[in-house]
Amino acid sequence: MTEVNAFIFFLACYGCAWIITYGKITLPMRQYFYNNKENTFMFFLYELTKCPVCTSWWIAILTLFTGFPQQVFNYQHSVMYLFLPFAVSGLTSLIIDLISEE
């Protein structure tokens, strides 16, 4: 069951990143960031929402505060959880490369 939960975790991070970066439902948010990009924080959010790999990294960071990764992976040393955002970003990049038409 742990493998299934891990798969769901990685897929959910990828899905959230894809929706934020490319989804129609988040288009108004991305346009708002673009229109207000003179503000440093809005520029950061605008740049972030252009990159699904970057977005997936931040999503994985946010999930560390939910406790879900701790239940799924159950690492003996807590420092191992710091590698999850990098794993999620790597898998996101791999998925994008695999489905890319270029």
Image (cartoon, rainbow, N blue to C red):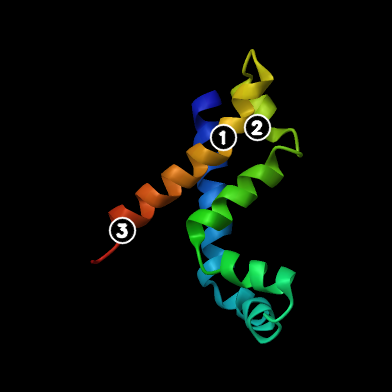
Provide residue 67's location: percent of width, then percent of height. Answer: 74, 33
Q: Give above or below for 31 relative to 59.
A: below
Tag 3 secondary structure: helix
Residue at 55 percent across and 52 percent down: it is: 56
Marks 3 and 1, how far apart at CA: 22 Å
Residue at 62 percent across and 31 percent down: it is: 82
Q: Tell me the crowding category of disc 2: few under 14, some 14 to 19, or many 20 or more residues within 10 angstroms, Cα based.
A: some
Q: Give above or below for 81 relative to 94.
A: above
The kind of residue tagged 3 is Ile
Point out the tag, 2 or 3, that comes first from the N-terminus.
2
Residue at 51 percent across and 52 percent down: it is: 14
Tag 1 secondary structure: helix
Which image quarter holds the C terminus?
Answer: bottom left
The kind of residue tagged 1 is Leu
Provide residue 93's location: percent of width, then percent of height. Answer: 40, 51
The kind of residue tagged 2 is Pro
Provide residue 40's location: percent of width, then percent of height. Answer: 72, 71
Residue 69 - label: 2
Do the residues under discs 2 and 1 have CB atoms within 8 angstroms? yes
Q: Kindly tell me whether residue 19 is visible in this rendering.
A: yes
Q: Tell me the crowding category of disc 3: few under 14, some 14 to 19, or many 20 or more residues within 10 angstroms, Cα based.
A: few
Do the residues under discs 3 and 1 have CB atoms within 8 angstroms? no
Q: Which residue is mark 1?
A: 84
Do the residues under discs 2 and 3 have CB atoms within 8 angstroms? no
The answer to which image quadrant residue 65 occupies is: top right
Q: Which residue is mark 3?
A: 99
Provide residue 89's location: percent of width, then percent of height. Answer: 49, 46
Q: Tell me the crowding category of disc 1: few under 14, some 14 to 19, or many 20 or more residues within 10 angstroms, Cα based.
A: some
Marks 2 and 1, how far apart at CA: 8 Å
